[in-house]
């Protein structure tokens, strides 16, 4: 079973992702939520997370900074970038070979 962490500062988006995901069907046993990048990083360090969905524009620690740290500290972690912004600059910052980008 897998653990997923949704890292987004907008509560309605975290809730929508949590509700819309077929987590049980995907073998996910636990879906955790973090309200910003700083909290998300702490949760990554505290829990054995298999998949993190990361928003790019957040207070405290933005998605780009979080992705760079996560890649160094958690090389096996699967990362999916999420962004609702029309400015592709946010997602372009995250364009590393092992990351998925969802706009």
Image: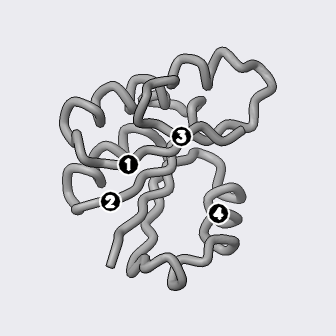
Splitting the image into 4 quarters, where does residue 67 fall? top left
> Which percent across, then down, holds residue 83?
67, 37
User: Closer to the camera, 15 or 54?
Assistant: 54
Helix, strand or loop under label 3: strand
Q: Which residue: 76% across, 19% down?
A: 87
Circles 4 and 2, Cβ within 8 Å, touching? The answer is no
User: Closer to the camera, 10 or 56?
Assistant: 56
Given this view, does label 4 or label 3 mark the residue nearer the observer?
Answer: 3
Q: Which residue: 59% across, 37% down?
A: 101
Circles 4 and 3, Cβ within 8 Å, touching? The answer is no
Q: Which residue is mark 1?
A: 78
Given this view, does label 2 or label 3 mark the residue nearer the observer?
Answer: 3
Would you call the spot at circle 3 few (<14 residues within 10 Å), some (14-19), or many (20 or more)? some
Q: Which residue: 66% across, 74% down?
A: 19
> Which percent across, then down, holds residue 93?
53, 17
> Which percent across, then down, holds residue 59?
52, 31
Q: Which residue is mark 3?
A: 100
Would you call the spot at circle 1 few (<14 residues within 10 Å), some (14-19), or many (20 or more)? some
> Which percent across, then down, holds residue 40?
38, 47
Given this view, does label 1 or label 4 mark the residue nearer the observer?
Answer: 1
Q: Which quadrant of the figure contains the N terminus?
A: bottom left
Circles 1 and 3, Cβ within 8 Å, touching? The answer is yes
Q: Which residue: 61% across, 41% down?
A: 82
Q: Which residue is mark 2?
A: 50
In the image, is 15 to the left or to the right of 84? left
Helix, strand or loop under label 1: strand
Circles 2 and 1, Cβ within 8 Å, touching? The answer is yes
Q: Which residue is mark 4?
A: 17
Upstream in sequence: badge 1 or badge 4: 4
Splitting the image into 4 quarters, where does residue 69 fall? top left
Q: Is residue 39 above or below residue 95?
A: below
């Amino acid at each position: 079973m897998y653990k997923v962490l949704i890292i987004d500062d907008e509560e309605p988006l975290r809730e929508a992702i949590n509700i819309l995901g077929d987590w049980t069907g995907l073998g996910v046993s636990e879906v955790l939520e973090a309200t910003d990048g700083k909290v998300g990083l702490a949760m990554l360090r505290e829990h054995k997370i298999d998949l993190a969905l990361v928003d790019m524009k957040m207070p405290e620690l933005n998605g780009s900074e979080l992705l760079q740290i996560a890649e160094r500290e958690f090389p096996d972690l699967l990362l999916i970038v999420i962004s609702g912004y029309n400015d592709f600059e946010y997602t372009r910052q995250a364009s590393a070979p092992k990351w998925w980008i969802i706009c």
